[in-house]
Amino acid sequence: MLVCGEALIDLAETAAGRYTARPAGSPFNVAIACARLTVPVAYFGRLSTDHFGSRLRAVLTDEGIDLRYVLSGNEPTPLAFVHLVAGQEPDYTFYVQGTVDHKFGPADLPVTLSREVTVLHFGSLSLVLEPGASALEELLRRESAHRFISLDPNVRPTLIPDRATYVRRLSSWLPHLDLVKASEADLAWLHPEETAEAVAQRWLAAGPRLIVVTLGSRGAIAITSGQSVFRAAPRIEVVDTVGAGDSLMAGLLAALGSEGALQKGALHRLADSDLARMLDHALQVAAITCSRLGADPPHYHELGPPAPTPDG
């Protein structure tokens, strides 16, 4: 699997009103969580040569993630201040202008990918900030004919200058996607006049085989053209929800891999019981992440046997 997108540093607010620096970024988190769930994973993104960039690279290396596709640059690492409000999702303030992660173009894309890369995952800020967004879009379109493509838009409204333009662009990706995971909040911002189910059905008609809508503490729904399966989230004592959606995304990919479903045309074979099992696994991964501080996804042994045998 190749995870494509930003890596940054979260400056997370603590109870004392101070901020702690933590490696982060939605695709970065997905890559870490996939690796911990025994999914073979490589990372494609642009990392700084500064102190924070070196730290991000070291974390990826320590987690056993393949860095052959990583780009380097001298610009600073992007930052995100994470403000915690009781009973609400974390609020983010991003500092990304002039930073390293999106300063690349089509000429910087890998010319070819290893045959072992059968899945590409995209998401978040990397598909908004130019020129990197257009380059990643080109990679997405180029590889979609023969590789499984997943997307988590992970919408950050403060970085999107025009909602209508972004919605049109996202819609243009749908014919190239196999799996889309989006939060209820994402869909409410993208299409405020429609229900999540209505949006999912319209997206399915455009191309993807599976849409997963996360519902926060309530759980998640897996929707195909002929099925809709809801699973409740495990009851836990929540410590920190940062990274929960990324962990759930990784849990989905790992579970689909263990079902042999991370292949073109394979998702239509999933029965209700398969979808329920997939959601339960993903929700458990997210719940464990929420039970501890920071985006700290579980290793597979924390979930119990049997170990998956995922697609690449």
Image (spheres, rainbow, N blue to C red):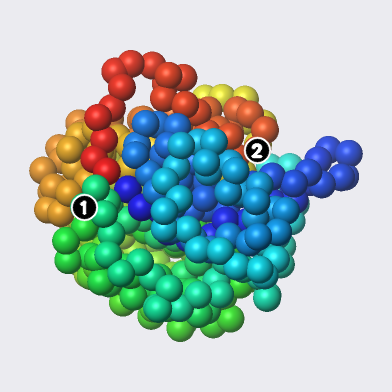
Crowdedness of circle 2 by 10 Å Cα count: few (<14), some, many (20+)?
A: many
Work out whether residue 221 can be spotted. Answer: no
Judging depth in this view, the residue of 65 and 144 nearest the camera is 65
| Mark 2 touches mark 1? (CB < 8 Å) | no
Q: Is mark 1 on a helix, strand or loop?
A: loop
Give the image quarter of residue 251.
Answer: top left
Indicate the amino acid at tag 2. Answer: Gly
Q: How many numbered marks appear?
A: 2
Q: Which residue is drawn at 46% across and 70% down?
A: 127
Q: Residue at x 55, y 71 (%)?
A: 102
Q: What element carries label 2?
A: loop
Q: Which mark is residue 115?
A: 1
Q: Residue 293: where, in percent of width, then height?
A: 67, 33
Give the image quarter of residue 199.
Answer: bottom left
The disc, 2 or 1, on the residue closer to the chain's N-terminal end is: 1
Give the image quarter of residue 40.
Answer: top left
Judging depth in this view, the residue of 60 and 7 nearest the camera is 60
What whole-number distance in Å separates the C-alpha atoms at marks 2 and 1? 34 Å
Crowdedness of circle 1 by 10 Å Cα count: few (<14), some, many (20+)?
A: few
Say if 39 sits above or below 124 in the image.
above
Name the mark nearer the viewer: 2 or 1.
Answer: 1
Judging depth in this view, the residue of 52 and 167 nearest the camera is 52
Which residue in the protein does label 2 denote?
294
Position of residue 209 in the picture relative to residue 279 (left or right):
left
Q: Which residue is drawn at 46% across and 19% down?
A: 302
Q: Residue 242: where, in percent of width, then height?
A: 61, 44
Q: Residue at x 15, y 54 (%)?
A: 264
Position of residue 158 in the picture relative to residue 118 (left or right):
right
Work out whether residue 131 can be spotted. Answer: yes
Indicate the amino acid at tag 1. Answer: Arg
